[in-house]
Image (cartoon, coloured by chain):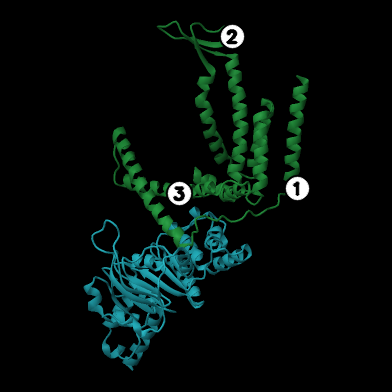
Chain colours: A cyan, B green
Amino acid sequence: MHKEYEEHKEHCLVFEEVVYRYPDTVLPALQGLSVAIPKGYRTAVLGHNGSGKSTMFLQAVGILRPQSGEVIRAGAELSYAKKDLADLRRSVGLVFQDPEQQLILNTPLEDVSFGLRNAGMDEQTIKQRCHEVLEQLDLTSFSDKPIHQLSLGQKKRTALAGVMAMKPELLLLDEPTSYLDPLSETLLLEGLETIYQQGTTIVMATHDMNLAYRWADWVIVLEAGRCFAAGTPADIFAEREALQAIGLELPLLADLWQSLPPRLTAGQTAPRNAGDFKDMLSLLLKEDMS
Amino acid sequence: MIRRIDAISYTNAFRHLSPMWKSAFAAVMFILSYMLHPVLQLAISLWMILWCIGYARIPLRAYGLLLGSALLFYCISLPALLIEIGQQAAPEAVMSVHLPLSSLSLYITTAGILRGSLLLARVAACMTCFLFIIFTTPFAELLQVLRKLRMPQIVLELMLIMYRFLFLLGDTAHGMLLARRLRGGRRGFMARLKEFAGMAGGLLAKTIHRYHGLSQGLLTRGFTGEISLPPYVARPVPRRYIIEAYAGITALLLAQLWMMWSS
């Protein structure tokens, strides 16, 4: 089922046979991970807890270092020299699952400016960039509110804003929608869409198969620290048995689409959101009845 | 209570006044509270209460609760200040109690009452000055003031991290306590004591976990070995407050001089 990533010309990052084992654990978290992150795509990384998603992200920003294998960026192996790591973290942003992990200063406005000030920007640019990003993510109304008074959704968007302000080429999001209510999820996804439209490659690790199906252009499935599959959502979710064999469920819409009679779906592109699905279904049923 | 104080510091009417001016005003009043006559110390207390409740619109209940909690420490130390013990009650004692089965007496003297009263006046004045700054200025702005006063960076960073962790720790402890209560908890004093000891251990483990997470977060956000705080932004203070502050301080100093000369 593994689709060759070489079919994509440009990649933001390539993992080559990366092995990493955390201290005091029996099994490696990454067991020869080979996968590429295509540039300009919305990529979803799927997999169970412990499949290696977060470890892969920590490798991507140089927090963890492969014990064997290599992480390649712009055709060269990652350098772990202090200056190179600083450059890497300016162009590859990581948003953690728990926003408390990366919110450092006291208010959204102050916190968003943290990375920019570390990068040595002048105060005028920092101010301008902060206001832009806060507005994009609809955070302006509480930009002066203390972080600990914000809701989880607001904290997640603030964490995202802090990373976005750095204008990274590649944005990695670890379970960004977990524990969020539907409204907060919608606001977050709208913010992501804005960033994507500005040319940032986005990679999202998630357990939410429906979200991955709806949102992603490219899907990577991790299993036990290895890449189990990588491809377009249509290709990946067409392999029902293979996914079920590793305990992953099909997205609801993909499942419903596949359960329709083949005479209706033949030659049609599977719809990826509920609105398109309803429109497509009514059209197909009308055609079938006439 | 700390959450309440924090929330008030961000929502009071003095929120947007220059933090440097507020700090300087509180500092001057604090020094005067220490030096002036007890009657003037009481005047300072009332004036600072007016600034907080009247001008900054700090909720009376929250203010009273914090001032009351602080004065509780004074009350705890009061017996040691007031009550004396001796073979025989001193002649100037205003109240005495003979301890049964002994030749000792407990007694209170006018000097002790005066000592307690003087201390109350000073404590109240100093506390109201502190409360002015605590309630009207958000912690982040206090850090900016300290930075402008050239406080070492490491101290500021420690204060910042402690402040962030205080709330995280509070949330974690609350969550753990709630989980234990929902599971029935333990009954009896000893059992509860054991439960709290267990919780303290759990809290430490979770704090270390949080610390580890935060250090990863710092690294990913380009931490360069120093947490750069936003620069101090000067803010205006309405003329009316400046005039009142100057007038009040001058009046206090003149009253002190008059008291010194007249005695």
Q: Label 1, label 2: how many angstroms apart (C-alpha)? A: 52 Å
Local packing at callout 1 (Cα closer than 10 Å; few below 14, some 14-19, many 20+) is few
Mark 1 belongs to chain: B
Observer-side mark, 2 or 3, equals 3
Q: Which mark is residue A166?
A: none
Label 1 secondary element: helix
Q: From the image, which quarter does the C terminus of chain B lie in?
A: top right
Tag 2 and tag 3 share a subunit: yes
Q: Nearer the viewer, residue A81 or A71?
A: A81
Q: Where is residue B222 in the image (x, y as percent from the top left)?
A: 49, 62
Local packing at callout 3 (Cα closer than 10 Å; few below 14, some 14-19, many 20+) is some
Check disc 2 and report the residue beneath it: B92
Mark 2 belongs to chain: B
- Disc 1 vs disc 3: Cβ atoms closer than 8 Å? no
Residue A211 visible in the displayed image: no
Amino acid at circle 3: Phe
Mark earlier in primary sequence (1, 3): 3
Local packing at callout 2 (Cα closer than 10 Å; few below 14, some 14-19, many 20+) is few
Amino acid at circle 1: Arg
Q: Position of residue A148 (x, y in %)?
A: 48, 53
Q: Label 1, label 3: how many angstroms apart (C-alpha)? A: 38 Å
**Residue at the bottom extreme?**
A290
Check disc 1 and report the residue beneath it: B239
Q: In this view, does A10 lie above or below B22?
A: below
Label 3 secondary element: helix
Mark earlier in primary sequence (2, 3): 2
Check disc 3 and report the residue beneath it: B165
Q: Is residue B110 above or below residue B21?
A: above
Q: Where is residue A96 in the image (x, y as percent from the top left)?
A: 41, 62
Q: Position of residue B136 (x, y in %)?
A: 61, 45
* Residue occupying image coordinates x 63% and y 53%: B232
